[in-house]
């Protein structure tokens, strides 16, 4: 997406009414999300795209950013569905833990993120909780995502275009029927992580001022 179009889109987002401190436009349809964000990068977590065979720890997705984390350390790759499908999930005690909170750290200047939520139970029984951080002091309001067809085998898509750069996103699933106090975590997996601007567009956007910054200065000439 052209930098000017990105600027216009963010301006329009800022003018939209936001509920209880929320500052983004959310999507439940992947096609609509990808059409809105323009050039993007999708991480499938599958071996065919260069990811290690699950189960395996993972932190970097092909460069310094994006990064993924769980419990302060790496996250995990785990198998899901027919082989060789893999997904991203939590990790604790140096092993896969689908009930652990998963954190995604996009690259600087990325403001759109989406993914498929897997193995989410029926509405009223389970939900995925998503918390977006942007480094500001605005009130943080979680998104609670429910399955839209009651079939755990069907992925549920969540996408958001934020009005600021996203510094981190936490996601976990919880059992809504839990009789115990606090949050009862349940299996939590995501797939097809999608980020924008995609790395190539982001590099061009950040590198654009360089020719101006490197313009040689004229040497001063003393009057003759």
Image: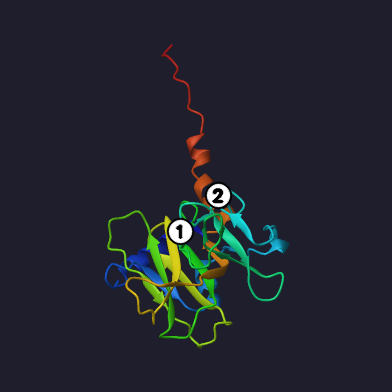
x and y percentages locating residue 140 in the rendered image: 31, 64
Please tell me in which quadrant of the rendered image residue 130 appears: bottom left
Disc 2 secondary structure class:
helix
Residue farthest to the bottom, as pictured: 149
| Dot label at residue 151 | none
Above-or-below relation of 209 to 176: above
Tell which residue pokes out farthest to the top in this image: 224
Q: Of discs 1 and 2, which sits in the foreground?
A: 2
Image-based side of 58 in relation to 180, left or right: right
Q: Which residue is drawn at 48% across and 78% down?
A: 28
Q: 75 or 92: nearer the eye?
A: 92
Q: Position of residue 86 (x, y in %)?
A: 64, 67
Which residue is under mark 2? 203
Numbered disc total = 2
Give the residue displayed 46% in from the left and 56% down from the top.
71
Percent coordinates x, y for residue 218 in the rendering? 48, 25
Q: Name the residue under label 1.
A: 4
Residue 205 appears in the picture as rendered:
yes
Please say if 79 is above or below 219. Answer: below
Q: In what element is the residue under mark 1?
A: helix
Between residue 186 and residue 81, name the one nearer to us: 186
């Amino acid at each position: 997406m052209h930098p000017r179009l990105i600027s216009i889109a963010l301006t329009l987002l800022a003018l939209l009414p936001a509920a209880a401190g929320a500052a983004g436009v959310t999507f439940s349809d992947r096609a609509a999300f990808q059409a809105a964000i323009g050039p993007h990068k999708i991480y499938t977590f599958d071996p065919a795209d260069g990811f290690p065979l699950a189960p395996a720890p993972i932190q970097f997705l092909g460069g310094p950013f994006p990064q993924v984390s769980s419990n302060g350390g790496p996250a995990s790759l785990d198998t899901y569905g027919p082989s060789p499908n893999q997904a991203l999930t939590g990790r604790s005690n140096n092993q896969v833990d689908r009930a652990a909170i998963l954190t995604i750290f996009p690259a600087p200047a990325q403001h759109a993120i989406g993914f498929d939520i897997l193995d989410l139970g029926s509405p009223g029984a389970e939900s995925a909780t998503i918390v977006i951080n942007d480094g500001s002091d605005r009130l943080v309001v979680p998104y609670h995502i429910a399955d839209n067809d009651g079939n755990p085998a069907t992925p549920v898509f969540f996408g958001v275009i934020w009005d600021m750069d996203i510094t981190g996103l936490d996601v976990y699933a919880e059992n809504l029927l839990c009789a115990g106090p606090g949050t009862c975590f349940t299996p939590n997996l995501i797939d097809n992580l999608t980020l924008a601007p995609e790395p190539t567009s982001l590099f061009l956007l950040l590198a654009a001022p360089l020719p101006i910054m490197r313009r040689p200065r004229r040497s001063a000439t003393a009057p003759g």
